[in-house]
Image: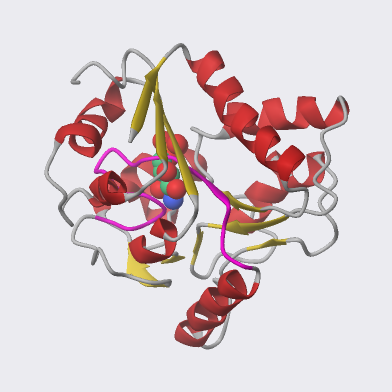
Amino acid sequence: MEVVIAPAEELARLAAGAVEGLLRAKPDAVLGLATGSSPLAVYDELARRHKEGLSFARARAFMLDEYVGLPADHPERYRNVIEKEIASRVDFPPDAVQGPDGLAADLPAACAAYEEAIAGAGGVDLQILGIGTDGHIAFNEPGSSLASRTRIKTLTRQTREDNARFFGGSVEDVPRHCLTQGLATIMEARHLVLLATGRAKAEAVHQLVEGPVSAMWPATIMQLHPHATVLVDDAAASRL
Ligand code: GLP
């Protein structure tokens, strides 16, 4: 695992640079997109590079996770967040960005279909990740099986509190369930690029880099990945 400690703007440039390098070498690459605030500067940088000629016209992308039950037009539905933050700002072909269907009548079937779609695309080449304060990646909360695949999960109180800021500050408005790629699904991506900034992430980053591999800190599974890059600022690295 490669750990880079640098100012936040530099981290965004490094992550965007990894995406650009991939797309230049493999224009039909499959990207893995994350929500949350951590990747936003990366998406800004990618949108800027797109204006300078970086093309996503042959690329595809898969999202990590989705809330269950948010209406199709809800601004915090992750499909809509990804559309706004990155998909609409570059030239992905229509329908090139997919996410788990949190409105499906049959959620387990939707999860299985999502796994098949990722495999059918040849797997994810580069997966962008954030990390929760409790060490979750995507929505794999503490206690998630290290061998998990895309499935329904119940969000922890901690995560719902962390994400309440996106729902007008009200924890009660944050959905209780989500669909998320599993840890084994994420581990199949060929390159993992995780971003973490701020002191609130320091304990999770400490566990990720220096803790024992454990389902109680799900991100620690990344220690077993052959190509994982962890991009952190000074504050997030303060417990290393
Ligand atoms: C949510 C997302 C995760 C993300 C995490 C951290 O729970 N499902 O993918 O990593 O938030 O979010 P932030 O980057 O806003 O701290």
| Residue 77 appears anywhere in the view | no
> Along the line of sight, which residue is nearer the eye, 154 or 1?
1
Q: Left or right: 237 with respect to 167?
A: left
User: What residue sits 83% from the left and 40% below the top?
Assistant: 55
Q: Which quarter of the picture shows residue 2? A: top left
Q: Quadrant of the C terminus?
A: top left
Q: Quadrant of the N terminus?
A: top left
> Along the line of sight, which residue is nearer the eye, 221 or 201?
221
Q: Position of residue 169 (x, y in %)?
A: 43, 39
User: What residue sits 78% from the left and 48% below the top?
Assistant: 27
Query: What segment carries the magenta color?
Result: 122-141
Q: Position of residue 162 (x, y in %)?
A: 35, 40
User: What residue sits 45% from the left and 84% below the top?
Assistant: 108
User: What residue sits 69% from the left and 25% below the top?
Assistant: 45
Ligand 1 resides in the quarter of the picture at top left
Q: Position of residue 190 (x, y in %)?
A: 50, 52
Q: Left or right: 125 with respect to 181?
A: right
Q: Find out whether residue 131 is within the magenta segment.
A: yes
Q: Quick one: which residue is furthest to the left in this view?
A: 212
| Residue 85 appears anywhere in the view | yes
